[in-house]
Amino acid sequence: MDCELCKAINETDRIIFETELSFCIIPKWPLKTGHVMVLPKRHVVDWSELNKEEAKDLIDLIDKMKFTLLKGFEEDCLILNHAGKLRSQQHLHAHIVPSKKAMRDFFLLTENIPKYEDVPEKVMIEMCEHVKKLL
Ligand SMILES: [Zn+2]
């Protein structure tokens, strides 16, 4: 298998921390200092492919790195995971990025979404019904 993220386990200069099942690296194209990626050592594409031990280990490492970055940077942290066709690597991974922006502000900016002060209840119900129909 030709997976860049499987190969990253051998790129020891990029590895920040590792456990038996997971590791944390600096991305090849970091957005800023403090941007890290956390991933399982075994190649899986989706969260559902992790066994319970791997899932717990991965979540624990994401949590550890989140607290480390919160302590080390005077910013909040966004934890992001591409789940579909826009992801550049098919190996499951989460990005943790220190951010001056809250999640809501981040998406308003990056997706050019009009800012609601308060989303009307009717719109919230429509949004809820839209996602429910997808289940
Ligand atoms: Zn892989």
Image (cartoon, grey):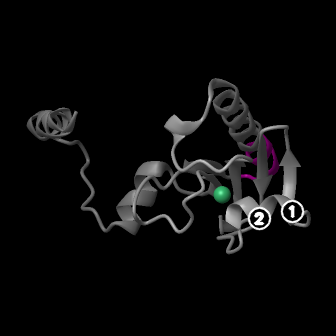
**Label 1 Cα crowd, 10 Å radius (few <14 / some 14-19 / many 20+):** few
Within the image, what quadrant is residue 128 found in? top left
Residue lying furthest front in this view?
Answer: 1
Position of residue 132 measured from the top left corner of the image (x, y, whole percent): 19, 32
Position of residue 86 measured from the top left corner of the image (x, y, whole percent): 42, 66
The answer to whether 2 is drawn above or below residue 133 in the figure is below
Residue at which label 1 appears: 10
**Label 2 Cα crowd, 10 Å radius (few <14 / some 14-19 / many 20+):** few
The answer to whether residue 128 is visible is yes
Residue lying furthest top in this view?
Answer: 52
* Quarter of the render that holds ligand 1: bottom right
Residue drawn at the location 66% of the way across and 69% of the way down: 2
- The front one of 65 and 14 is 14
Span shown in magenta: 68-74
Position of residue 134 measured from the top left corner of the image (x, y, whole percent): 19, 39
Residue drawn at the location 86% of the way across and 62% of the way down: 10
- The front one of 88 and 6 is 6
Position of residue 49 measured from the top left corner of the image (x, y, whole percent): 54, 38
How many numbered callouts?
A: 2
In the image, taking residue 44 as reference, residue 62 lies left or right, namely right
